[in-house]
Image (cartoon, rainbow, N blue to C red):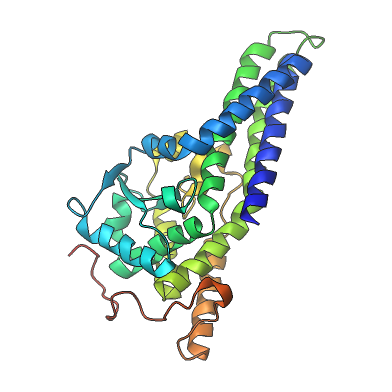
Amino acid sequence: MSYLKTAILLAGLTGLFMGVGYLIGGASGAVIALVIAAATNIFAYWNSDRMVLSMYGAHEVDRNSAPDLVQLVAELAGRAGLPMPRVFVMDEAQPNAFATGRNPQNAAVAVTTGLMQQLSREELAGVIAHELAHIKNHDTLLMTITATIAGAISMLAQFGMFFGGHRSNNSGPGMIGSIAMMILAPLGAMLVQMAISRTREYAADDLGARICGQPMWLASALGKIASAAHVVPNPEAERNPATAHMFIINPLSGQGMDNLFTTHPSTENRIAALQQLAAQMGAQGGTLSVNDRGNYPRRGPWDRPSASRGPWG
C-alpha cells in the first residue's frame, strides 16, 4: 500500500508539474516539464535525503560524539526490527525531528539540539520511535521525494511568473494567468502532500508508541514540541516550507501564506489517540494488540521508571 500511495502521489505531482509547463510553453512546455519531472523523480529517489539533511545543516554523529543518543536509537531500532539508521543532529533551537531515506537500509534519523535539550530521555525515545515507525512504514521515501518535487513545482511556478508575465495571452499565460499559476501551483502541491500526510502521522504515532512501549512518552513529547514550535522559529523551514511535512510537528510559525494549510493533524487529536492507546494497554494488563506489527512490551527499553530530568544529565 505504501508503494501504491507513493506512485499515486508522484503521478499527481508530475501531472501538476506538466500542467505548469503547459501554461508556460504550451505542448512543448508540457513535454519539457515531463522530462524535467522524470529527471527530478530519479534524482530525488537517490539524493533527496542528502539534500534535505544538507539543507538543515545536519551533521552525522556516532557513539563517540553522541553516545547516549546513538545508543537510544540503536535500542529502539532493535525493538522495531530495523537496521541501525544513521543519526544526525541539527543545530536548531526549535525542538523537532524527522526521518529520511529511500528504504530502511538507507535511512537516517535527524533531531534538533533543541529537542535533546528540552525533552526527557523517555520523551525523546517516543519521538525517535515515531521516526523509526515512518522508516518501517516506508514513509520516508514518500516524504523526501514529495519535498523535492513540491519545491520544484514552486520554483517552476515562480519562473513562469517571470517568463510568462510579459507574454501575450496567445503565446503564454499572461500576467493574470502567471500570478494565478504562481499561487495555485504550490497550493496544489501542498494539497497533494496533505492528502496522505494526516493518516501517515497517525499511523506513525501508533506504531511508534508500540515500539517504545509507552504511548504517553510520545504524547508528552508532542505537547512540548507543539508548544515550542509556536514560539521558537525554524528559519530554514520557513525558507523551505515544502519540507515542513517531514517533521514530527509542523515547524512553521504560521505567520505566512504557506501555513494556511497544515500537513499535520491536530496535535490535540494525536495526543487523544495516544491516550486511548494507553488506556487500551491498561485494560489489557499492559499488553498491546499489535496484530502483525510485532509484540512490543509495555515497559520501556531501559526497564526503569521514567525520570523527570533531561536525557543527557
Q: Residue at x 60, y 44 (%)?
A: 260
Q: Which quadrant is home to the N terminus?
A: bottom right
- Residue 61 position, x and y percent, is 25, 48
Marker count (numbered): 0
Q: Residue at x 28, y 44 (%)?
A: 60
Q: Residue at x 58, y 33 (%)?
A: 41
Task: Locate residue 9 relative to residue 305 in the image: left or right.
Answer: right
Residue 230 visible (yes or no): no
- Residue 165 position, x and y percent, is 68, 13
- Residue 204 position, x and y percent, is 52, 62
Camera-nearest residue between 70 and 42: 42
Task: Locate residue 127 relative to residue 276 in the image: left or right.
Answer: left
- Residue 312 position, x and y percent, is 20, 62
Q: Residue at x 46, y 46 (%)?
A: 101
Camera-nearest residue between 229 and 52: 52
From this view, report whether residue 235 is shown above or below residue 217.
above
Residue 185 visible (yes or no): yes
Q: Which quadrant is home to the C terminus?
A: bottom left
From this view, report whether residue 200 is shown above or below residue 269.
above
From this view, report whether residue 97 is shown above or below residue 178.
below
Camera-nearest residue between 239 and 101: 101
Place residue 172 in its image quadrant: top right
From this view, report whether residue 205 is shown above or below residue 100.
below
Task: Locate residue 170 relative to residue 76 in the image: left or right.
Answer: right
